[in-house]
Image (cartoon, helix red, strand yellow):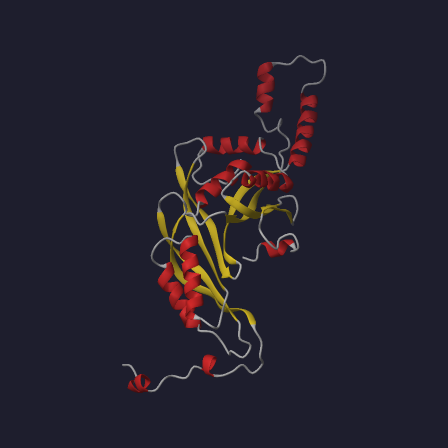
Amino acid sequence: MKNRDSAVRPLPDVGIDATAGAAGRLDWVGMEGIALPVCFDAGGGEVQRVAATVDTFVNLIHAQQRGIHMSRLYLLADAHLGGKPVDAASLERLLRAFLHSHEGMADRACIRLRFDMLVRRAALRSDNHGWRSYPVRLEASLSEHGFRFELGTDVVYSSTCPASAALSRQLIQHQFAEAFPPGASLDHAGVMAWLGGERGIVATPHAQRSTASLRVRYASKAQLPLIALLDRVEQALGTAVQTAVKREDEQAFALANGGNLMFCEDAARRIQHALDGDAAIAGFNVRVAHHESLHAHDAVAYVQGGTLEDVMSSPPAAWFPW
């Protein structure tokens, strides 16, 4: 039962009524790690309702102001994010609501959302399909410089080392020379049997699961084409990890790896060229990490394109604060 006195006597709010003990403007104040449901269309026309982690912020422009109205940010986020699918336009409306709720206190607002999106993927050769889970990161801000929006995700793929492939081929050549000495007649059936056996292919190049982390800004506030972005990058790499796999799919994947030997530098350039060719993208930065099977460390490359600000002067770690 509600306390009747609370309807008569206003509850104290020291965050607003009291002044700060030490004066100073604050760049960002808000909440991190809010759990909220979000509706999202990845671009295939199917809206999914997902569990998101949300960060909400405004700045504090008055040095003597004790604090902000955090409950207002929470309630606004809850009201705006659970209904229609999230896109750039809806996030801009939410940020304007943040500033309206803090009129006279803040002139900048920011929101970040993180969630996983399931996308249906076809097998390479068979008629099977399976679900891939892709992380989605959305960040939007509103300031005197206008509205800014970025989409982030990860693409996981296989990378086979070109140097290791060359070393493996040399060992196979040496093994062949021992099995079939120079001047000896070559029997087709015997060579085929040798190639199909473990004694023939004595070495295989090392391959590893690898990750391309993408951060993209689009030129307009159109619907977010996550699937189109994933397709473009995965086609450029050629060896995206699979879901449902039968033997014919595994063989096709082995063939794709053999035809797409790449260092992390090669992968980064492939993605750079793929994104540079998309007129809808205003700017991007990419981090490629090959999680080495030979070494205990990762091989990493960074690349950017377009007109994303504050990247050239920032260390690589600042590109991906998410």
| Residue 54 in which image quadrant | bottom left
Q: Which residue is located at x 40 percent, y 63 percent?
A: 77
Q: Along the horizontal axis of the image, is 22 left or right of 79?
A: right
Q: Nearer the viewer, residue 167 or 202?
A: 167
Q: Nearer the viewer, residue 318 or 196?
A: 318
Residue 207 in sight in this render:
no
Q: Along the horizontal axis of the image, is 142 left or right of 44?
A: right
Residue 317 position, x and y percent, is 62, 55
Q: Nearer the viewer, residue 302 or 239?
A: 302
Residue 320 position, x and y percent, is 57, 54
Q: Residue furthest right?
A: 182
In the rendered image, the quadrant that contains the N terminus is bottom left
Residue 141 position, x and y percent, is 50, 59
Q: Is residue 282 above or below residue 25?
A: above
In the rendered image, the quadrant that contains the C terminus is bottom right
Q: Which residue is located at x 41 percent, y 61 percent?
A: 94
Q: Residue furthest left?
A: 1
Q: Which residue is located at x 50 percent, y 58 percent?
A: 146
| Residue 175 in which image quadrant | top right
Q: Is residue 148 above or below residue 29?
A: above
Q: Which residue is located at x 64 percent, y 14 percent?
A: 186
Residue 133 position, x and y percent, is 44, 48
| Residue 275 in which image quadrant | top right
